[in-house]
Amino acid sequence: MSSLAAWISAGILTMLVARAVWVLRSEATQEDDGRPRGIPPGDGYTEITSDYSSGLGGGNQLTTRVPKDPQEYARSFVPKRDRQRS
């Protein structure tokens, strides 16, 4: 590789790294504009429906119920064998 090609490659690499750092810093400092994250705690469930279709007549539909109560949500991650002990 000639020295000119090495300098050009180094310059392009430097610009790419600088651009990546600039993008990451700008995304890290963006405000959320008051948008709430997640769902507010409460009673009941939030239902999430996912559909899959292969396009050839097959497919799947799944409905997942996620509790709005944070304690109940945390308990859902405890294995069944450990839930029975308490």
Image: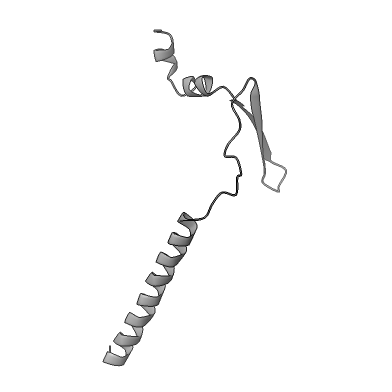
Q: Is residue 66 above or below residue 13?
A: above
Residue located at (52% from left, 24% from top): 70
Observer-nearest residue: 85 or 44? 44
Can you give x and y, in whole percent of width and height, for residue 22 in the image? 43, 66
Observer-nearest residue: 9 or 68? 68
Residue 54 in view of the camera: yes
Can you give x and y, in whole percent of width and height, for residue 59 in the image? 67, 40
Residue located at (47% from left, 19% from top): 75
Q: How many marks?
A: 0
Can you give x and y, in whole percent of width and height, for residue 68 in the image? 59, 25
Quadrant of the rendered image containing residue 16? bottom left
Q: Quadrant of the C terminus?
A: top left
Q: Is residue 20 above or below residue 54?
A: below
**58 on left or right of 5:** right
Can you give x and y, in whole percent of width and height, for residue 18 in the image? 39, 71
Colour mapping used in the image:
one colour
Residue 2 in view of the camera: no
Extreme residue in the right direction: 57
Q: Is residue 81 above or below residue 26?
A: above
Quadrant of the rendered image containing residue 12? bottom left
Q: Quadrant of the N terminus?
A: bottom left
**40 on left or right of 79:** right
Residue located at (29% from left, 85% from top): 6
Observer-nearest residue: 23 or 83? 23
**21 on left or right of 53:** left
Observer-nearest residue: 31 or 72? 31
Q: Is residue 76 above or below residue 14?
A: above
Residue located at (43% from left, 70% from top): 19
